[in-house]
C-alpha cells in the first residue's frame, strides 16, 4: 500500500545508543493525479459490522458503502482488499434495475512483504453510473487466522489497521496513480461483535452500555482500525479521555493515562482541537507485533504498542512524537513526495520536543536537541544527524524522503529546523499559524511549496532566506567563538568556516564570581565582531549555551567523524543490507591505523554493531565473540551498553547456555541503572519467558 501508519520497528540487532524503538513513516499520496472528472466530491460512508469468531481465529465483515458522486459518468468502481481476506461479495441493493457485473479481481499489488499485498476489484456497471449521484453497495468478506502489515487475526489479540492493510473493502483513491494501492478515508459506523471475554478499542464514539456488539461512530474521516483482546482498560477523566488498554496489570499503568493526557494537552495547545473523540494506548503482544512489522504504530485515534515497550516507564518524547502524528501525517497530508518527511515526521518530532520542554523543563529539551531523549532513539537528535552528515549521507531536508538516513535527517535535523523557525517568528505566533493552517487544510492534501507559503502568510513573515539556508541547503553551520576583555567590555567574534549562515545566537558571559548574562548576537558573515559591555572580570564566554541552533561543535565533529563507519553500517543494516554492513564493520576493525586512542568508543561501537548484524544472520558463535569483545573495550557507550548485554542474552538463549544467561542477567541490571533505565532488562525477561 502507498501509505502507512506511523510506525516504530523494534530491531534488537540495530539499536542506536540504547533506543529500542526507531520510528519509520511514509508519505500518504503521490503527486500524480488522474483525470479530474473521476474525483469524488466527498468521503465514502460505511455502515459495517465486524464479527469476530469465538476462537479469535476468524472474522467476517459485512455492510454497506455509500460512495460520493463524481463529476462525470463512470463505468466502474475499484475496491481494494487485502489478499488475507476472501469470499468478497458485492451487491447493489438500489436502485432496482441496475445491472452490476460480477467483480473482476485484478493483479495483486505487492505489499512490503510477501503475503501483504492488496487485490484491486473492479466493480462494473452494464450502463455507466450517472454523474452527480451517490452509489450504494453492499459487501461481505471473510478472513481466517493470518498476519499482515499491522494486522493480526488470532488469539489472544486481534488488531486491524486500515491505513496499512485493506482489511475491509476500501474505495480506490482516484488522486493516486503510482502503481501501488491507496484507499480513501471514510466516515460512518463500525460495529464490532465480540465473543465472551474480549473487549475492543477503536477511536470512534460508542455507547457506554454496549458490551458484545459495540458500534463506533466516526464523524472525522478515518481509516477504520481496532484492537480486540482480553483487555483491562483504565482511563483519565480528561476531555478528550485517554484510555490505556493493558493485557495485564502494571505498577506504572497510571503513568500512561496521566502522561498521555499531559502530552495531548500540550499538543492541543500547539496544533488545535484533537480530531478524535478519545485517544488510546493499546497493548499488543511483542511477538505478534513483530510478525506484523512494527513495535508501535500510530493510527487514527490511538497507538498500538508492544508489551516490551509498555513494560518501561512512560516516555514523553516517544508519545509526544506519536501523538503528534494524530495531526501531522494522519489529519494533515501532502499531495507529493517532496517535503513529506519534514511535513509529517519532523513536525511530529517538533511537537515531541515542545512536550518535553513543557512537561519536563528546558534542560530535558536541551539534552533532546543535543544527544537524544533517554530511552528514545538516540539517533533522532542533533548529534545523530551530524553523524549521518559525517558519514556522507546528508541531503536537503525536502529531498530526504526515502530510507533510514532520510528518517534520521528529518528527526535529527528537521525537528530542530521547525524549532528554530518558531524561535525566529516567536513560538506563540508559530503555533497560531499551524493551528490556522490545520483548520483550513485538514484532510485536504497540500503541496510542499503551498505549505511553506501558508506558513509565511499565517505568520506575516518573509521567510525566503530561512527556507533557503535551512531547507534547500544540506549541512549545518560550524560557528566558532573568539573573545577578549578590556576596560568594561569584551570583544566577541563569531567565525564561520564556509558559506555563512544568517543566525541570531545567544552569547553567554560568565563572571569569575559565577554571575551570568546572555546577549543576543546577529551573525551573517564569515567573521562577525561585536562589542559587549561587561561590568566584571569574565571567566568564560560561550556560544549558544542551550544549543538552540543546530550546529557543529569541535567535539561533535570529532565524534561524528570517529563513528562514521559505524553510522554507515547501522544504516545499511537498518536498510536490510546486513552483509554489506558486516563487510564495512570488519574492514574497519581490520584497519591497523585505527590507533590506541578511543575517546568515543569506536572499538566498542564497531564490535557491538558487528555482533548485532551477525545475530540477525543467526551466526551466534561469531556474534557472541564480537559482543564479548565489545564488552571488554576500554571505552563503552553507557546508554547503549544494556542493549549489548540484551543481544548477548539472546545469544545465550539461542545456544541454551544457562551460565552465560545468568551472567548477562546480573550485568544487564547494573548497566541499565547506570544508563538511567533503557528497558533492556524487561525486553530480555520477555525473551526468556517466551522460550
Image (spheres, grey):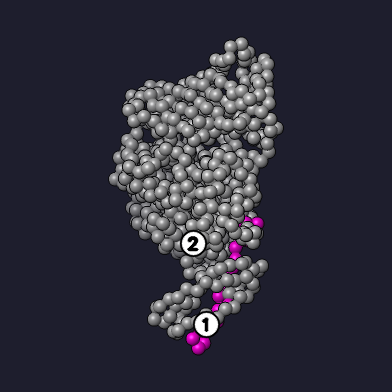
Q: Which residue is mark 2?
A: 370
**What segment carries the magenta color?**
469-493
What number is the disc on residue 490?
1
The image shows residue 450 at horizontal and vertical percentages of 63, 48
Considering only vertical position in the picture, is 274 above or below 38? below
The reply to whether dot 1 and dot 2 touch (C-beta < 8 Å) is no
Q: Residue at x 63, y 45 (%)?
A: 447
The picture places residue 656, in percent across and down from the top left corner, at 39, 42
Label number found at residue 223: none
Q: How many neighbours does mark 2 have within 10 angstroms: few (below 14), some (14-19), or many (20 or more)?
A: many
Q: Is residue 104 left or right of residue 548?
A: right
Quadrant containing the C terminus in the rendered view: top left
* Camera-side residue of 285 and 493: 493
Q: Is residue 466 magenta?
A: no
Asked if residue 585 is positioned above or below residue 298 in the image, the reply reads below
Residue at position x 50%, y 82% from top?
533
**Residue 444 left/right relative to 288:** right
Q: Position of residue 219 (x, y in %)?
A: 47, 33
| x 34%, y 53%: residue | 669
Residue 477 part of the magenta segment: yes
Q: Where residue 660 appears, x then y in whole percent? A: 38, 49
Answer with mark 1 or mark 2, whichever residue precedes in sequence.
Answer: 2
Instruction: Locate residue 523: give its quadrant.
Output: bottom right
Residue extending farthest top: 97
**Number of residue marks:** 2
Amino acid at each position: 500500500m502507498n501509505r502507512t501508519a506511523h510506525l516504530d520497528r523494534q530491531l534488537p540487532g540495530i539499536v542506536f545508543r540504547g533506543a529500542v524503538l526507531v520510528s519509520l513513516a511514509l508519505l500518504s499520496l503521490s503527486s500524480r493525479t488522474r483525470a479530474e472528472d473521476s474525483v469524488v466530491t466527498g468521503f465514502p460512508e460505511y455502515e459495517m459490522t465486524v464479527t469476530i469468531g469465538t476462537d479469535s481465529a476468524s472474522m467476517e465483515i459485512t455492510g454497506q458503502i455509500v460512495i460520493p458522486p463524481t463529476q462525470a459518468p463512470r463505468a466502474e468502481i475499484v475496491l481494494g482488499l487485502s489478499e488475507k481476506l476472501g469470499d468478497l461479495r458485492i451487491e447493489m441493493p438500489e436502485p432496482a434495475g441496475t445491472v452490476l457485473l460480477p467483480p473482476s479481481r485484478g493483479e495483486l499489488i505487492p505489499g512490503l512483504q510477501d503475503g501483504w499485498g492488496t487485490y484491486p476489484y473492479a466493480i462494473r456497471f452494464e450502463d455507466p453510473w450517472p454523474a452527480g449521484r451517490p452509489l450504494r453497495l453492499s459487501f461481505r468478506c471473510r478472513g481466517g487466522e493470518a498476519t499482515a502489515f499491522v494486522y493480526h487475526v488470532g488469539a489472544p489479540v486481534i488488531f486491524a489497521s486500515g491505513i496499512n492493510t485493506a482489511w475491509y473493502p476500501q474505495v480506490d483513491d482516484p488522486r493516486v496513480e503510482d502503481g501501488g494501492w491507496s484507499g480513501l478515508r471514510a466516515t460512518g459506523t463500525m460495529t464490532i461483535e465480540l465473543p465472551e471475554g474480549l473487549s475492543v478499542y477503536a477511536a470512534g464514539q460508542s455507547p457506554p452500555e454496549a458490551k458484545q456488539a459495540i458500534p463506533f461512530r466516526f464523524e472525522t474521516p478515518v481509516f477504520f482500525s481496532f484492537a480486540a483482546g482480553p483487555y483491562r482498560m483504565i482511563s483519565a477523566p480528561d476531555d478528550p479521555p485517554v484510555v490505556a488498554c493493558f493485557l495485564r496489570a502494571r505498577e506504572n499503568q497510571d503513568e500512561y493515562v496521566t502522561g498521555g493526557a499531559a502530552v495531548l494537552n500540550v499538543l492541543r495547545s500547539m496544533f488545535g482541537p484533537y480530531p478524535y473523540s478519545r485517544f488510546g494506548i493499546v497493548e499488543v503482544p511483542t511477538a505478534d507485533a513483530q510478525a506484523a512489522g512494527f513495535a508501535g504504530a500510530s493510527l487514527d485515534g490511538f497507538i498500538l504498542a508492544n508489551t516490551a515497550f509498555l513494560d518501561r516507564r512512560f516516555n514523553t518524547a516517544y508519545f509526544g512524537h506519536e501523538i503528534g502524528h494524530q495531526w501531522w501525517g494522519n489529519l494533515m497530508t501532502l499531495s507529493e513526495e517532496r517535503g513529506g518527511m519534514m511535513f509529517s515526521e519532523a513536525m511530529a518530532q517538533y511537537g515531541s520536543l515542545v512536550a518535553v520542554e513543557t512537561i519536563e523543563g528546558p534542560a530535558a529539551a536541551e539534552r533532546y536537541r543535543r544527544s537524544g531523549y533517554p530511552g528514545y532513539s538516540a539517533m533522532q537528535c542533533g548529534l545523530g544527524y551530524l553523524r549521518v552528515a559525517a558519514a556522507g549521507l546528508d541531503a536537503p531536508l525536502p529531498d530526504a524522503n526515502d530510507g533510514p538516513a532520510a528518517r534520521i535527517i528529518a528527526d535529527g535535523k528537521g525537528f530542530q529546523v521547525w524549532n528554530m523557525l518558531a524561535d525566529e517568528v516567536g513560538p506563540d505566533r508559530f503555533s497560531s499559524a499551524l493551528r490556522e493552517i490545520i483548520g483550513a487544510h485538514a484532510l485536504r492534501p497540500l503541496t510542499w511549496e503551498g505549505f511553506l507559503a501558508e506558513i509565511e502568510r499565517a505568520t506575516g513573515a518573509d521567510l525566503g532566506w530561512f527556507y533557503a539556508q535551512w531547507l534547500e541547503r544540506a549541512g549545518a553551520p560550524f560557528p566558532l567563538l573568539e573573545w577578549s576583555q578590556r576596560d568594561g567590555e569584551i570583544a566577541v567574534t563569531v567565525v564561520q568556516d564556509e558559506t555563512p549562515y544568517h543566525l541570531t545566537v545567544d552569547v553567554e558571559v560568565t563572571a569569575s564570581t559565577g554571575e551570568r548574562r546572555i546577549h543576543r548576537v546577529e551573525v551573517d558573515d564569515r567573521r562577525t565582531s561585536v562589542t559587549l559591555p561587561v561590568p566584571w572580570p569574565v571567566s568564560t564566554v560561550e556560544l549558544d549555551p542551550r544549543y538552540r541552533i543546530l550546529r557543529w561543535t569541535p567535539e561533535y565533529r570529532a565524534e561524528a567523524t570517529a563513528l562514521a563507519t559505524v553510522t554507515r553500517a547501522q544504516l545499511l543494516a537498518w536498510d536490510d543490507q546486513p552483509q554489506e554492513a558486516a563487510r564495512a564493520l570488519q574492514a574497519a576493525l581490520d584497519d591497523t591505523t585505527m590507533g590506541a586512542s578511543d575517546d568515543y568508543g569506536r572499538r566498542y561501537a564497531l564490535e557491538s554493531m558487528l555482533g548485532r548484524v551477525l545475530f540477525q544472520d543467526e551466526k551466534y558463535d561469531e556474534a557472541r565473540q564480537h559482543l564479548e569483545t565489545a564488552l571488554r573495550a576500554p571505552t563503552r557507550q553507557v546508554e547503549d551498553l544494556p542493549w549489548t548485554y540484551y543481544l548477548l542474552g539472546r545469544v545465550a538463549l539461542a545456544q541454551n547456555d544457562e551460565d552465560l544467561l545468568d551472567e548477562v542477567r546480573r550485568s544487564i541490571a547494573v548497566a541499565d541503572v547506570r544508563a538511567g533505565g533503557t528497558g533492556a532488562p524487561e525486553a530480555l525477561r520477555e525473551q526468556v519467558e517466551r522460550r
